[in-house]
Image: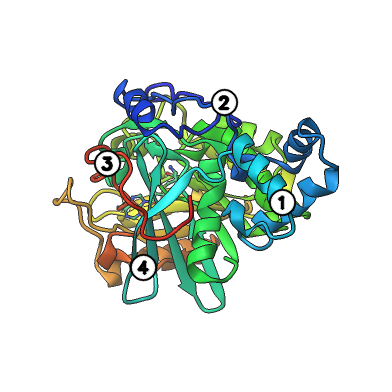
Amino acid sequence: MGPAPTDPDASAPAPHDRGAARAAHDAGPGAPPAATGRPVLTGLSLDALRALFASLREPAFRATQVFQAVWREGTTDLAGLSTLPKALRARLSEAVEPTATTVVEAETSEDGTTKLLLGLADGARVETVMIPEGDRRTVCVSTQVGCPIRCVFCASGVRGLLRNLSTAEIAEQVLRVRQRLGARPSNVVVMGMGEPLLNLKHLAAAIRLWEDPAGMDFGARRITVSTAGTAAMVDRLAEEDLGVHLAVSLHGPDDATRRRLIPTSPEGRVQDLVDAAARFARKTGRDVTVEYVLIEGENDRPAHADVLARLLVGRHIHVNLIPLNPVAHRPELHAPSNAAAHAFARRLEDAGVPTRLRSRRGDDIHAACGQLALERAVSGPAAPAPRSGDA
Ligand code: SAH
């Protein structure tokens, strides 16, 4: 499956020396951020914070206060930790890096979808999207800078993988959205840039941070992890017992079609992947979603629907059909007509497979599925002045 991603340690400190950070970044794809010896506050579990405060000879309740300030109130500015004595705040600021991201740019589309471009300490950039829908405020989180899986219709993989995000860089995206909205997000979908299950260690730690009842207390049921991976990767996610909802990016009902659309997908068979998804559904007691990007002439024929239905019926799997969002690198690929998309959905439904046809969101600001790109991610200054944020 593509190049092996690097694995910067979850507790790897963020660089604060921009020069050194840029040098590390320039070292090439996969270069982790430079080390400063300081952990990032937003990547620390409550236990890790307790250990940190113990090393500062401070009582454990201080750790809880800080954890609550970050994850309940969304405070990432050390000066805003008003429950701490000033002297302790000063010592804390020497012990930790408060954040791993700054908001470099924010855009809101006509339908309310908001995209944040986040700058990382080594100069890399990632995007986080917030999609409002009724009462829901769903955050779409990135897990890698770039992506090693080159789905032909997705902008994230065009330039390959630069590196994995750290726990703090993943977890903090939800805080940045929260700070922007002034309100708690209601759902998280791990469907931004990158292949989440190739960065499972840091993703799992970020999910545990979101879920911690002492902090944000985010229900696992409101978190969806989406993967274009293999049966083995899905099984590994199941072993983590995170309680999250699973979405599998299938896109082709048979091996040949899937491999044409995901050329880097390993030898793994569609049938094995669906079997793993069904095992995941059995284990968690919740339906798994199969995501299927509809592309005219590629995978949208009635025969495709019939094969897909036979594969999925009765397996506690429902289908999310996503009409292709246009991407600049493959202008010849199109979504099917509305009528064709509806006919595809109806065919699956009639065969007994619960199906939803997704509407397009945020494409006027290039925030729709598959449009998160690296365009501005690797060039330009390493640390542009943040427009908001507090790092
Ligand atoms: N790598 C993971 C998560 C990121 S993609 C995965 O593939 O699941 C999240 C979803 O957006 C996937 O289902 C993906 O196939 C879909 N997507 C990517 N590019 C798209 C495009 N151009 N139009 C519509 N959906 C797209």
Say which amino acid is labelled 4: Arg
Residue 124 vs residue 330, the one in the foreground: 124
Residues under labels 4 and 2: Cα distance? 41 Å
Residues under labels 3 and 1: Cα distance? 44 Å
Q: Residues within 10 Å of mark 4 (few under 14, many from 20)?
A: many
| Residue 91 image-quadrant placement | top right
Between discs 1 and 2, the one toward the N terminus: 2
Q: Residues within 10 Å of mark 3 (few under 14, many from 20)?
A: some
| Residue 382 image-quadrant placement | top left
Of marks 3 and 2, the one in the foreground = 2
Q: For mark 2, what is the residue?
A: 37
Q: For mark 3, what is the residue?
A: 152
Circles 4 and 3: CB distance less than 8 Å? Answer: no
Q: For mark 4, what is the residue?
A: 361
Where disc 4 sits, the SS reads: loop
Q: For mark 1, what is the residue?
A: 66
Where disc 1 sits, the SS reads: helix
